[in-house]
Image (tube, rainbow, N blue to C red):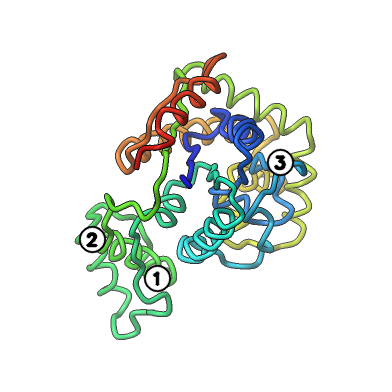
């Protein structure tokens, strides 16, 4: 049984394709977006969960909980095994490349409890600069220093080319101008659907964890609620940062994973079905 991945930049239409595919091939969907694991973040994260298809790893954490790629690796691999045991096809869908890579590849993490207590902040920063000479991390922010050093050390350990599963890796792409227009329209729709109310509820909670500050939309609207910018500026920033994020995602996937790319157009779903049929018996 193959594992199917539907990846690509934000706004390109991954969710729709994954849902159609799950219906067609009797699959089950596994979330591969780092923000959609959190309860109550529906609109800003473009979360869509359809009740007629089993969905996994959505809404499994609260705002004040920490969840990382290591935890996702364990959870996702467990779900893949369970889905395959049921005779169904696991379909990972999302734009968080690190989560996908951690789950499917021989991605090794160091000791999650390591705090580098034997190193000073300055010494940790010195180690980080061996990997990123231009880092802007504040030397006084120990938590972020430790997190970044762990990231670089685990990257060093990774066997980036060793897939642990028989997988079809599909990437969705779109002409940049069309994608940016689609992103802008989606942000406008999010506002219409109640993004401000969702953000205000989180803002009023006074919770400012990574979970809250990571999704594009909340930090910009928090600045609006604080009176630092007007609503028009906040929405413009959401659109701009979403477009920039899409560009970074596309670059990451191009450089880090060997995806089979499909241009999103009217017949893309049928092209993907044909590709999967052609590769169904290949290892």
Element marked by disc 1? loop
Mark 3 and mark 2: Cα distance apart in space: 37 Å
Question: Where in the figure is residue 27, as x and y percent of width and height?
Answer: 61, 42
- Give the crowd class for mark 3: few <14, some 14-19, many >=20 residues within 10 Å: many
Name the residue tied to disc 3.
Answer: 43
Question: Where in the figure is residue 151, as x and y percent of width and height?
Answer: 35, 62
Image quadrant holding the C terminus, namely top left
- Give the crowd class for mark 2: few <14, some 14-19, many >=20 residues within 10 Å: some
Mark 3 and mark 1: Cα distance apart in space: 34 Å
Of label 1 and label 2, which has the lower sequence position? 2
Name the residue tied to disc 1.
Answer: 140
Query: Given the current orientation, which residue lies at the most extreme top position?
Result: 266
Question: Where in the figure is residue 11, as x and y percent of width and height?
Answer: 57, 30
Of label 3 and label 2, which has the lower sequence position? 3
The numbered dot on residue 129 is 2
Residue at 62% over, 56% down: 57
Of label 3 and label 1, which has the lower sequence position? 3
Element marked by disc 2? loop
């Amino acid at each position: 049984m193959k594992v199917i991945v539907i990846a690509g930049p934000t706004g390109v239409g991954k969710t729709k394709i994954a849902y159609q595919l799950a219906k067609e091939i009797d699959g089950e969907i596994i979330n591969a977006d780092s923000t959609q694991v959190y309860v109550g973040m529906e609109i800003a994260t473009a979360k869509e969960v359809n009740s007629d298809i089993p969905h996994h790893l959505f809404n499994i954490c609260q705002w004040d909980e920490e969840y990382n790629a290591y935890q996702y690796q364990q959870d996702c691999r467990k779900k893949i095994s369970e889905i395959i045991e049921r005779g169904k096809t696991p379909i990972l869908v999302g734009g968080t490349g690190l989560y996908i890579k951690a789950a499917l590849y021989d991605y090794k993490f160091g000791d999650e409890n390591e705090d580098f207590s034997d190193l000073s902040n300055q010494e940790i920063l010195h180690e980080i600069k061996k990997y990123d000479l231009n880092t802007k991390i504040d030397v006084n922010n120990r938590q972020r220093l430790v997190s970044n050093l762990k990231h670089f050390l685990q990257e060093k350990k990774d066997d980036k080319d060793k897939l642990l599963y028989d997988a079809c890796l599909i990437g969705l792409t779109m002409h940049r101008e069309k994608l940016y227009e689609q992103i802008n329209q989606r942000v406008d729709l999010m506002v219409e659907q109640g993004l401000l109310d969702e953000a205000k509820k989180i803002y009023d909670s006074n919770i400012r964890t990574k979970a809250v500050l990571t999704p594009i939309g909340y930090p910009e609207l928090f600045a609006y609620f604080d009176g630092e910018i007007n609503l028009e500026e906040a929405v413009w920033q959401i659109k701009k940062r979403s477009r920039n994020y899409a560009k970074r995602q596309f670059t990451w996937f191009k450089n880090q994973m060997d995806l089979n790319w499909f241009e999103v157009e009217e017949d893309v779903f049928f092209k993907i079905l044909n590709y999967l049929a052609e590769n169904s018996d290949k290892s």
